[in-house]
Image (spheres, rainbow, N blue to C red):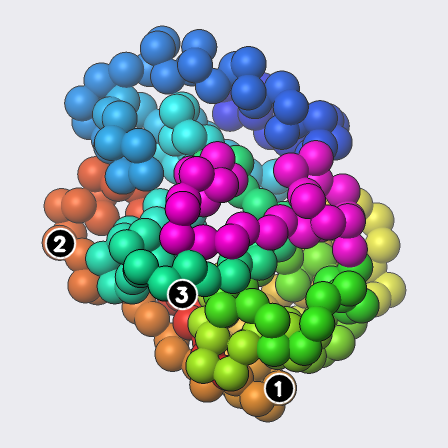
Amino acid sequence: MKKLFKFILNTIPRPILIRLSIVVRPILALLLKGSRFTDPIDGKSFRMFLPYGYGNQRNNVLSPSTLSLERHRLLWLYLQNETDFFTAKDKKKVLHFAPEQEFYKRFKKQSNIEYTTTDLLSPLADVKADICNLPFEDNHYDIIFCNHVLEHIPDDTKAMQELYRVLKPGGMGIFQIPQDLSRAVTFSDDSITDQKERAKIFGQYDHVRVYGRDYFDKLRSIGFTVIEEDYTHKIAPELVEKYCLAKGEIIPVCYK
């Protein structure tokens, strides 16, 4: 199964995968139904989660029902338990880059947010836009989600500046990235263009860098106030295992 999923991820373009998953999800959820692991996003339980990874694959990480990964489930729990994202009475303007399927329909249904999605390629995007040249007004959004996007962007400084520009003063942004916390400094090398070599070095064929611990300070240099939220340490260890979370993953919670 791991080889099959690796082949699919590395050969089928992402927009097509998104469309195919709509058909595949209910079948997988039925076949893998059990009690060992639970997806906190929809509350459904399974005997196993699916493997995932473009290079080295991780076991028990992809939820059969929502197709969420560790980072998605962690973010959901953070929003649910530590913010008023789902309960605020005042309507908030939310901008979501490269919207994840497991969030898209749920956020769309929320009456307390005005929800806009954006991306260059995603079929779920309301606005087709370049993150380095956004067509939105200054100080416009209360909340911005931009998760696992910046590692794809050659000029991530310009992208961060645009995120800062369109966020309202006092607004919150969550900008998760794949991060190697053992690295002090982010690594990039523009000379690496071969997709297999990129997957080997950067973790995915379309990534252009590996972020280190300096990622948070780079966000601060743009102007953000950054909270390095080590949220798995606030969750009971048995739930970290049951929800299949990545222990020690940091959520970058950014304020303007």
Determine crowd level at label 1: few under 14, some 14-19, many 20+ residues with C-alpha closer than 10 A. some
Pointer 3 residue? 251
- Mark 2 or mark 3, earlier in chain: 2
Horizontally, residue 34 falls left or right of residue 147, namely left
Q: Give the image location of residue 81, x and y in percent.
A: 23, 57
Q: Amino acid at mark 3?
A: Ile
Determine if residue 207 is in view: yes
Determine if residue 214 is in view: no
Distance between mark 2 and mark 3 Cα atoms: 17 Å
Q: Give the image location of residue 179, x and y in percent.
A: 51, 64
Residue interval drawn in magenta: 104-129
The magenta stretch spans residue 81: no
157 relative to 77, above or below = below
The disc at residue 65 is none
Q: Give the image location of residue 94, x and y in percent.
A: 52, 59
- At 15% from the left and 52% from the top, the residue drawn is 237
Q: Amino acid at mark 1?
A: Ile
Pointer 1 residue? 222
Pointer 2 residue? 236
